Image (cartoon, rainbow, N blue to C red):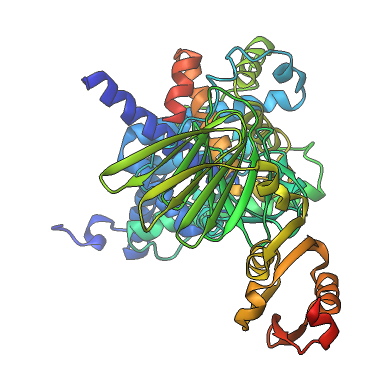
Amino acid sequence: MNIETVMDEEKLERYRQASEWLVCLKSTNPSESEVERWLTWCEEDPQNLAAFEALDRDWNDFEGLRTAPALITSAASQLSGSRMRDAPRKSRPPFPRCAFWQASIAAAILIVTVTGYEFWNRTLQAPALVTSANWKPAVLPDGSSFVLSAKAAAEVDFTGPSRDLKLRPEGEIYIKVHHDKTRPFIVQAGNVTVTAVGTAFDVRRDGDHATVTVEEGTIRVLAPGADGPLEWQASAGYQIDYSEREKTAVVASVDAQQVLQWRRGELSYDRKPLATVIADVNRYSTTRIVISDPDLERMEFSGTVFMASISDWLTALEAVYPVKAHESAAGVIQLLSVPMPKRDRAR
Amino acid sequence: MTLSDSEKHPEGPRKADAASRAAEVSRLFKEHNRTLVLYLASRFKDVQSAREVAQEAYVRLLQLESTGTVSFLRAYLFKVAGNIAIDRLRQQKTRSRLNQPEELDDTFFEPSPERTLIAREELAQLGRLLAELPEKYQQAFRLRRLEDHSFADIARHMGIKERMVRRYVTNTLVYLRLRREGVSSADSWRQVQA
């Protein structure tokens, strides 16, 4: 680094600080201590004051545009969109700021439900947490769409050079990635990193397992192995099931449509153990069903569960199978076996 | 100090105090005039009002019985000036500003960084520079600077955090400064984003 760039950085930092002070002073009434801190900063270095004055002049010069706003929009952007895109942010040295500024950092994460989605859909300039309570697909600012399973949440950060989505433990997300060669879409599920450019896939976190199912295109999966990082590639119709405990993955061909049916809010089964069905219902719905009887767990179930009406499904289950749904404390439903009439049992 | 105040000033200690206080306040003023006017100009749209208020603050400071330490004085000066500014802004709201006093004693004021409204061509250039930035930067800056919205309101309007609105506005200021200093748009943008 030569002296010139050091000087440039100093000047740049000075302008940054001056700009912070300027908006601080131009906002509401600055407090006495803020004015005091600003004066101290001004007196620390004559160049600080000069920088502040320069920015203050620039600010004042804009006064004329108040009456001639057309002068701003008449000029077309000279830079290409890609060059003007936000670069990844570096941390800056701490700088005394207005109290008001500090207060706004307190709300670090914006929590948004899919129903209140329009609010942040327009722009996503800051990392956000997305959750969903139904199976309504939602669209991310880059054009990608996703469906989150119930109870699942994901942190979305589009401020960097890549589109980052971090899946919280226990949950599943289906993403149809909007194609953008310059900005890979990266999903982080525990230790597992899934990279896509333009494709549709599903990521599920369940205990120590992260399962990636590809519906369209190709994805790359990166995860820690026993001797260093491992990488897998999978294309449509394949599933990568990674175990954090064993630090390895199993790649298998699957019926992607079967795997992804959850995102339509329904689960269809053909002679599957009730334990499997209940596990899925628990995963994708907000209800929690417990089976305490091993015989019940092994019982085979065929049919469709509509996630929006779990209670109806339970009623139907009671009518057809020798079970009784009993709501114990705090929204937990217990499935108990009930003696069946002899003729039904013979069937 | 070898001479007592009464010896230095035969008129008596009271006048001597007043004289030394005047000298102290005067020095304080010369030292802080730039920042004081800048500070006041941030409340008023015009530098003229800022100067008038600075002048008034100076008078009030001279009328103080005891000036105390310099650090206290500086804080006091800015506080007094701030209060006068608030009073004046209230009056401006209720009263027409047609009969504004014109001339004021500029003895204590260095040449200010004031510029009158810049020429239309320069204004157009400023508009072009702003238009180089991404739309969200332009929007945040426009709403803050030209439409006087609060950061909180802009954040709500744009659906982003206040912190981001502030970042857009401050980054825009730095970008414009670099551009006006002849740095290329690409370099300016890179530096702002660094």
Q: Quadrant of residue B45?
A: top right
Which percent across, then down, holds residue A90?
Answer: 39, 38
In this picture, residue B179 sits left or right of residue A315: left
Q: Nearer the viewer, residue B179 or A60?
A: B179
Which percent across, then down, holds residue A1?
Answer: 22, 22
Q: Nearer the viewer, residue B145 or A46?
A: B145
In this picture, residue B157 sits left or right of residue B23: right
> Can you say whether A60 is above or below A289 in the image?
above
Seen as rendered, the residue at the extreme top is B121
Q: Quadrant of residue A140?
A: top right
Q: Nearer the viewer, residue A21 or A89?
A: A89
In this picture, residue A80 sits left or right of residue B156: left
Q: Quadrant of residue B6?
A: bottom left
Q: Which residue is located at x 76 percent, y 90 percent?
A: A339
Q: How many numbered marks have been drawn onto this rendered protein structure?
A: 0
Q: Nearer the viewer, residue B49 or A324?
A: A324
Q: Which residue is located at x 49 percent, y 52 percent?
A: A210
Seen as rendered, the residue at the extreme left is B2
Which percent across, then down, holds residue B158?
Answer: 71, 41
The answer, for residue B77, to whether it is visible in the render is no
Which percent across, then down, holds residue A61?
Answer: 61, 24
The answer, for residue A274, to whether it is visible in the render is yes
Q: Which residue is located at x 54 percent, y 59 percent?
A: A103
**Split into 4 quadrants, where in the image is the C terminus of chain A?**
bottom right
